[in-house]
Amino acid sequence: MRLNKYISETGVCSRRQADQWIEAGRVTCNGVRAALGTKVCAGDEVRIDGELVGSKQPQVYIALNKPAGITCTSEAHIEGNIIALIGHQERIFAIGRLDKDSEGLILLTNNGDIVNEILRSENNHEKEYVVTVDRPITDFSLSLMASGVRIMGEMTKPARVSRVDRQTFRIVLTQGLNRQIRRMCSALGYKVQRLQRVRIINVHLGDLKVGEWRNLSARELAGLLPSSDVAPPTRRPPTTVVRS
């Protein structure tokens, strides 16, 4: 098994993060500094920053309704980080990002394979948002968002856009440029007042309350990884995070 896959399956981080740590010289295998592509066999000792990496952990898949003001990072020293908010017993990390000022659905896991599957841009996975701007938005502006807006020197991919009310619309994206929706709105002269993600592929936010999280169902996992043999998660009722 490749070292990055081994590390991700222990729940420490994603494969991408593991590669970064390997390149930075933070990972050893049997006491020797590891390199990208290192193979791990049964009985090998893998350490990160000198700390032994344990055996494979139970796979965890979580849907969280992220509050605004929470940062999607695993860095413990950052105040208001998403991992501290959840306080899960397993070492988990967010799949992708939802910027600090935004709210809504975000997935977390300890399985690096699902991270790569969902974030790979060529898979064109859908993400749906409800957006409220600072003034009435015109039909022409909505049509421009649907066809593509130039931001950061490139045109955004076509999107599905529909009006909710005078200042609110739904948009379904298949790409995830940095602060894409906010930049699209700004390019057309609008300022986002509220941005909420309500769907990732086949996983819907539904009636999950802000700050509450739940485990994904077997059906949801099958839709995320249709060819995967991922075992169904242990069922657990929704958990609300109480913030002081």
Image (cartoon, rainbow, N blue to C red):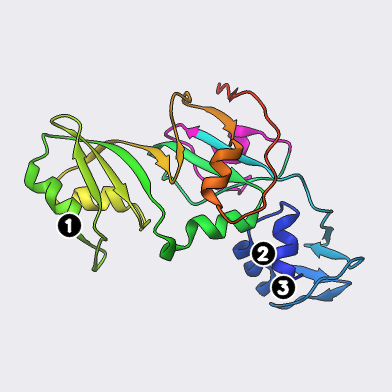
As for residue 71 lying within the magenta part, the answer is yes
The picture places residue 202, in percent across and down from the top left corner, at 45, 42
Q: Identify the residue at horizontal 55%, vertical 23% (top origin).
A: 243
Q: Which residues are magenta?
A: 65-89
Return the mark for residue 25: 3
Mark 2–mark 3 Cα distance, whole angstroms, equals 11 Å
Contact (Cβ within 8 Å) of mark 2 with mark 3: no
Q: Amino acid at mark 1?
A: Ser
Q: Position of residue 63 (x, y in %)?
A: 54, 36
Picture quarter containing residue 134?
top left
Secondary structure state at the residue bearing disc 2 = helix
Q: Position of residue 165 (x, y in %)?
A: 16, 29
**Amino acid under disc 2:** Ala
Query: Which quadrant would the N terminus be assigned to in this image?
Result: bottom right
**Alpha-carbon span between mark 1 and mark 2:** 37 Å
Of 185 and 78, the residue lying toward us: 185
Q: Main secondary structure of the magenta part?
A: loop
Question: Which is more N-terminal, label 1 or label 3?
Answer: 3
Q: Is residue 100 left or right of residue 25?
A: left
Circle 1 is placed at which residue position? 147
The answer to which of 25 and 121 lies nearer the viewer is 121
Q: Residue at x 57, y 21 (%)?
A: 242
